Structure formats: structure tokens, C-alpha cells
Amino acid sequence: MAETIATPTDLPPMIREHLDAIVRLARAYEVERLEVFGSVMTDRFDPERSDVDFLVSMRERGALDDFRRYVALGAAP
């Protein structure tokens, strides 16, 4: 995974708190690009009610394998 984070301080607190785990999962599931978007990037984010949206691009290995990794990543703790 190519890491192109300007600085961790540019990230929302919710993402900074879990950054190590996010990077670990991204590497384990061969994520090439991971973007966060939505309310978590604004002052409207409510940790009690809002979700966190990610756009994920994974290294291609074949349709069935790609699908299995995508589902496994979504189910990862």
C-alpha cells in the first residue's frame, strides 16, 4: 500500500485514534489506496450516530479472490 498521508494531524481524531489498526488491515488485505470521506471529514461528525466512509482500491488478483478479500476486509474487527 502506498501511503500518501500528508500528516496524521490532518486526519480527523476518529481516524487518528485507529490509524495503526487501519494501516495494518490495509496491508493485510493488499489495499493499494484508501480514502476517507463523508461527515467524518467535517465538523458535523457525531461519533454516536455517524458512520465512517472509506473508498478502497485493492490490488487485483482475480475476480473471485478480489471479492473474497473485499468481503473479509469489511468483516474484519
Image (tube, rainbow, N blue to C red):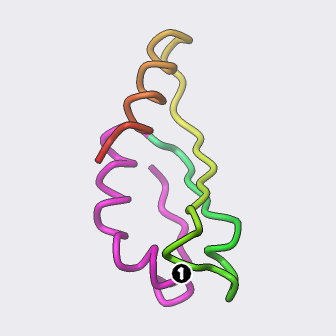
Q: Which residue is mark 1?
A: 11
Helix, strand or loop status at disc 1: loop
Image coordinates of residue 29 in percent, x first then y, are 37, 37
Left or right of 58 in this view: 16: left
**Residue 51 in magenta stretch:** no
**In front: 40, or 5?**
40
Image coordinates of residue 39 in percent, x first then y, are 68, 72
Q: Residue furthest front?
A: 49
Range of magenta residues: 1-30
Hey, which quadrant is residue 35 in on the image?
A: bottom right
**Residue 22 in magenta stretch:** yes
Picture layout, residue 11 above or below residue 36: below
Residue at x 45% of width, y 73% of height? 15
**In front: 52, or 64?**
52
Hey, which quadrant is residue 52 in on the image?
A: bottom right
Image coordinates of residue 73 in percent, x first then y, are 40, 37
Left or right of 37 in this view: 69: left
Residue at x 48% of width, y 62% of height? 3
Our reading of the magenta stretch's main secondary structure is: helix
Image coordinates of residue 22 in percent, x first then y, are 37, 59
Hey, which quadrant is residue 63 in on the image?
A: top right
